[in-house]
Amino acid sequence: MGHLPYIIQHNLPLLLPHQTLLPKKVKKQKTMNEGGGLGAKWSVKEDRQLVESWINVSTNPITGADHKKSRFWNKVEILYNRYAPERAIKRTGKICNARWNWASPLVSKWCGSVAEAYRINPSGANEDTIMQLGHESYQTKVGKTLVSCIDGSY
């Protein structure tokens, strides 16, 4: 076997000048919505969970709302994915932020209504009472509840 070429002795492929044995570069798989694509549509339940996650992070009295943007949306991402509806796609903080731009005007009005309820601060009111007053105030201003706005009937 000593007289056979090395590549044949070792069962190596015969390469043409333009070929290489180096592995081909594998393209990185994109996660949902990366790269400017439309990605998967959001369901009504996913929109609700996003809004609930945003409200929980932004009104948390322990951590407060004073976060850097990336840290804030990381917390929203964690909450959203933890309580996402069954079979929902995992969403990144960046994607949640992009979707938030749609829901933001509705929730901003709701937050204003809740802040107004806190300012009124009726005697003996607890958190539940203040939230109820906030919802009622929002419905008076907008004509619908926040939930019906999120459901798409806005």
Image (spheres, grey):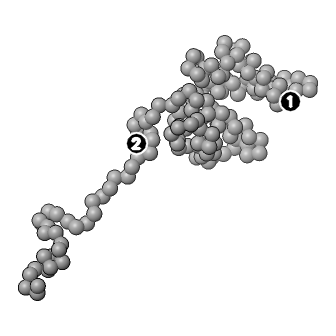
Residue 54: x percent and y percent? Answer: 64, 36
Reading the image, the residue beneath label 2 is 35
Residue 127's quadrant in the figure?
A: top right
Residue at the image position 56 percent from the left and 27 percent from the top = 44
Q: Is residue 69 visible?
A: no
Q: Residue 28: x percent and y percent?
A: 38, 52
**Looking at the rendering, in which quadrant would you find the C terminus?**
top right
Quadrant for the N terminus in the image? bottom left
Question: Callout 1: helix, strand or loop?
Answer: loop
Q: Which residue is mark 1?
A: 126
Q: Residue 134: x, y in percent?
A: 76, 23
Checking the image for residue 116, the label placed there is none
Looking at the image, residue 10 lies above or below residue 86: below
| Image spot of residue 112 (x, y percent) | 71, 25
Residue that lies at the very extreme toward the right in this rendered image: 123
Ranked by sequence position, the earlier of labels 1 and 2 is 2
Q: Please state which of residues 11 and 135 is positioned toward the viewer in this rendering.
A: 11
Q: Tell me the amino acid under the disc marked 2.
A: Gly
